[in-house]
Image (tube, rainbow, N blue to C red):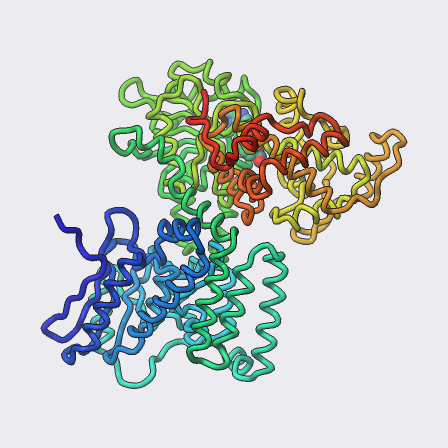
Amino acid sequence: MASRPPVALDVGPDGIAEIRFAAPAKGPPTLTVEAMGAFRRILSELARRGDVRGVLLVSEAPGAFLAGADLKEMAEILSGPDPGSRVRTLAAEGQGVLLELERLAPPTVAVIAGACLGGGLEVALACRHRVAASGPLTRLGLPEVKLGILPGLGGTQRLPRVVGLSRALGVILAGRDNLSAEEALRIGLVDALVPVEDPVAGARAFLARLRPGPPRRARPPLLLRLLEATPPGRAWIFRRAAAAVAREARGLYPAPPKALAAVRAGFATPGPRGYEEEARLVGECAATPVAHHLVSLFLRSRSSGNEALERMEGPPPEAREAAVLGAGLMGSGIAHLLASRGIPVAMRDVSPALVAKGMAAAARIVREDARRRRLPRRDGEALLRRIRPRTDLLGLGRADVVIEAIVEEVEAKRKALAEAEGAAPARGRPPLLATNTSTIPIREIAAALRRPGRFLGLHFFHPVRRMLLVEVIPGPATEPEAVAEAVALARRLGKVPVIVADRPGFLVNRLLGPYMAEAGLLLEEGADPGELDAALRDFGMPMGPLELLHEVGVGTAKKAAAVLLGAYGERWEASKLLAELDPTVPLMKGERGRRRPDRATLEALRARVAAGKPPRRDLPRLEMRERCVLALVNEAAHALADGIVASGSDLDLAMVLGTGFAPWTGGPCAFADARGLGAVVRDLETLAARHGRRFRPAPLLGDLAAKGGSLAGFAPGRPSR
Ligand code: NAD
């Protein structure tokens, strides 16, 4: 059977043409090279015909208009020869196609229902009008800079002309992908809203109402318009944007400054030069390893865990009801997450006051979302009603999935989970049981259960709503169906599941162990705490190690450190200073965003543990960064050799999503590969000569270096049991 063309043209007897983007077998329609070719032929035909009164651009995919460039194609180009000039050429060709769209004589209307992102929005921007289906499915944006590139099909040229300079910069430089239809209407990105039930009919009615003359849509407020109308005003806007970009991209991400340059090239003097610059600059971005890393991470994040699903015959059964044990920091976050995806959940704690505290925490998240207009108030109320506070076992019997997030004590967890197991009905499918433990081996908890095949670790990270990673940790008896159900659940909750072996600290905390310990050892040597945090922020970490320790909580971190040292202490060295930290004394002072480590407390501790050794006040940032990062990279190699995850690229994905490990690097393994594994081994040996055995290179690094292998590409196979 011949496959359907990706784009087709239908002209009705009323003279209204529909350009239809076909729904591919999987995922939303994208602008593949083939689709762009078909699109161009259709536009040429339309330009020749004299019988068309109006043109609608519609998508046949439910829930998506056009999701932008095809990222699989993009990833192949980025890892192929000369990606810079290939992308530049493709961008210039695509710009040509959209210019033909822009020049069509009849009015053109993009009918946006669902995702309209990147190249998809650039197509819509080349139409004279845009209408969007109201409701939560519609999302517009230009997320390119998040992938290390920039909008290359005229987005940097057309968006500022449609919504004004400031607002366009806000969308392009932040890589926003979440403008709602309502917000798009408010800023003039779309001309009208159409009913979600039948957007095409709405668009036809819009077309019938159109009067000649320039489109009428919302404009920026007067003050902004005045500012943007004068050269000094524009210069001020560009200066401010450049400063913000420099602050946030830290010179690590080439795309935002280049996107800014592309906007600047075309804003004052519209014409071909702006488009040429845009194509040239997107080519420059594509030639950087950062683009390659960010696109690969994105693609991996979408397929992660597939291996568990592919082993099954069909999709695993969907959870209809859930229960969460523990209404603390994590339990309340997990209950909120489940409820936010429409899953009713019983949340249990040991006293009414504690459950009420958990409910209040969930309500705080809802209020914050309402304030930021991410969630209509009514939906927030419905969400909270889906969480049923409990102190007894009621509600547990109906749950298809039970997630335990109580205190980190093995006996308590065994008891709570065995109780949940006992509360399940005797007939039917037993519920999936999961623990959110950070440090207790899954096998130890499993030993107390009657059906350990239905049990596994499901490790969320704090704060649950923001951190995308979930470690899925099968125990020795966990059945493949249970793993598949956990993977499917994590996806349904909008998270990225990575399957991790049942080893102490699992993956993320194990790798953070030596990184944090090194930070502590640096402090003992006399490193300035503020400098230490800054050194790792400069490297691209979202926060320094002390800020991270403060966020995680000193008490929690000490507990984790004890477990990790028990398991890997032969290779590691503990930090006395961290061990002596008092969990009840805050490590940082000041408000979030302006927090600084409490120097006096840390200095007093240093003096105590250093036993008279004079402090090294001149420790350079580069040395601090090298030591912390290489300690983590070395442990990554040990963990891979242990079979902790299926591949180095899984490890990279988990570290970027679970800790924010400098995304520009592509993750710890890609970072090591970029330096060269031979060089990493030499650098570790130099550090080992100075600081001792903790820096002795993991044997895998030397082995791979000798074979010319790669750490990111290293695949020990399935995570070992
Ligand atoms: P928390 O102290 O905030 O909450 C634990 C809650 O469990 C308390 O409200 C407690 O009253 C309740 N509880 C104790 N026994 C119970 C029982 N038998 N039934 C029902 N509730 C019971 O702790 P937390 O930070 O939310 O951590 C919970 C779990 O998640 C721990 O296993 C922890 O290791 C893990 N975890 C924590 C983090 C983190 O950053 N805090 C991250 C990932 C995983």
Who's the residue at 27% across and 46% down the image? Answer: 26
Of residue 429 and residue 419, the one placed in the foreground of this image is 429
Which quadrant holds residue 718?
A: top left
Left or right, residue 656 beside residue 395? right
Who's the residue at 32% across and 62% down the image? Answer: 134
- Is residue 353 something that shows in the picture? no
Who's the residue at 82% across and 45% down the image? Answer: 618
Total of numbered circles in the picture?
A: 0
Q: Quadrant of the C terminus?
A: top left
Left or right, residue 539 beside residue 494? right
Question: Looking at the image, which residue sits at the far left?
Answer: 13
Q: Where is residue 231 drawn, in percent x and y? A: 57, 83
Who's the residue at 43% across and 36% down the image? Answer: 497
Of residue 337 and residue 313, the one placed in the foreground of this image is 313
Q: Where is residue 604 drawn, in percent x and y? A: 84, 37
- Is residue 87 something that shows in the picture? yes
Q: Where is residue 129 drawn, in percent x and y? A: 31, 74
Q: Where is residue 103 drawn, in percent x and y? A: 29, 78
Figure check: 441 above or below 345: above
- Quadrant of the picture in which ligand 1 is shown: top right
Which quadrant holds residue 452?
A: top left
Left or right, residue 363 beside residue 316? right
Figure check: 276 above or below 541: below
Of residue 206 and residue 84, the one placed in the foreground of this image is 84
